[in-house]
Image (spheres, grey):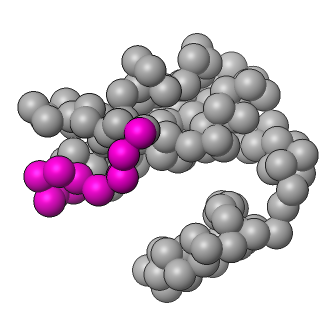
Amino acid sequence: MVLTGAPNDLPIINDVMRRMRERPVNLAGKTTLTQLAALLQRADLLITGDSGPMHIAGAVGTPLIAIHGPTDPALSGPVSPGATVLRSGIWCSPCYNATGPADCRFYTTQCMKNITPTQVREVVHEKLKQSLQAK
């Protein structure tokens, strides 16, 4: 497993790493965009939020799971046929407006909390199974 991100993501990444049983490779803040694209092209799967790497993975053909909470996958989601979008679909989502702050106007992050690790794990297993069958 490889974790990526910007240098300012390191506190969150370090917290995630402390909770993991297996030690991942931490490349946060250590790759250029070109290197990230090459890394994603070789990856078996990307799990991501609505992000630039999500679009890079789609462009290089990497299977991906895109987790959308406040953002609208119809507007900013992956266009790759190998992509799976996970979202909770609660009444207030999508609510993100790129012209304003990213804070939830209802002071909750329930749209993200509703997407459980178990749901993500199930999709990961299915996508990796499909990937192995295709090889």
Q: Residue at x 67, y 65 (%)?
A: 6
Answer with the quarter of the image where residue 17 lies.
Answer: bottom right
Q: Is residue 122 above or below residue 132?
A: below
* Farthest bottom residue in view: 18
Answer with the quarter of the image where residue 123 lies.
Answer: top left
Placement of the C terminus among the 4 image quadrants: top right
Q: Residue at x 61, y 73 (%)?
A: 8
Question: In this image, 50 relative to 10: left or right?
Answer: left
Q: Position of residue 69 (x, y in %)?
A: 31, 42
Q: Nearer the viewer, residue 97 or 55?
A: 97
Q: Nearer the viewer, residue 135 or 43?
A: 43
Q: Position of residue 107 (x, y in %)?
A: 14, 59
Question: In this image, 114 relative to 99: left or right?
Answer: left
Please, what is the dominant secondary structure of the magenta stretch?
A: loop
- State which region is magenta: 99-110
Residue 78 magenta-highlighted: no
Q: Residue at x 40, y 18 (%)?
A: 74
Q: Position of residue 102 (x, y in %)?
A: 36, 52
Q: Is residue 119 above or below residue 28?
A: above
Q: Nearer the viewer, residue 28 or 21?
A: 28
Placement of the N terminus among the 4 image quadrants: bottom right
Q: From where the camera sits, is residue 7 visible? A: yes
Answer with the quarter of the image where residue 55 lies.
Answer: top right
Q: Nearer the viewer, residue 13 or 124?
A: 13
Q: Is residue 12 above or below residue 96?
A: below
Q: From where the camera sits, is residue 42 visible? A: no
Residue 101 magenta-highlighted: yes
Q: Position of residue 42 (x, y in %)?
A: 82, 41
Q: Is residue 111 above or below residue 129?
A: below
Q: Residue at x 49, y 40 (%)?
A: 50
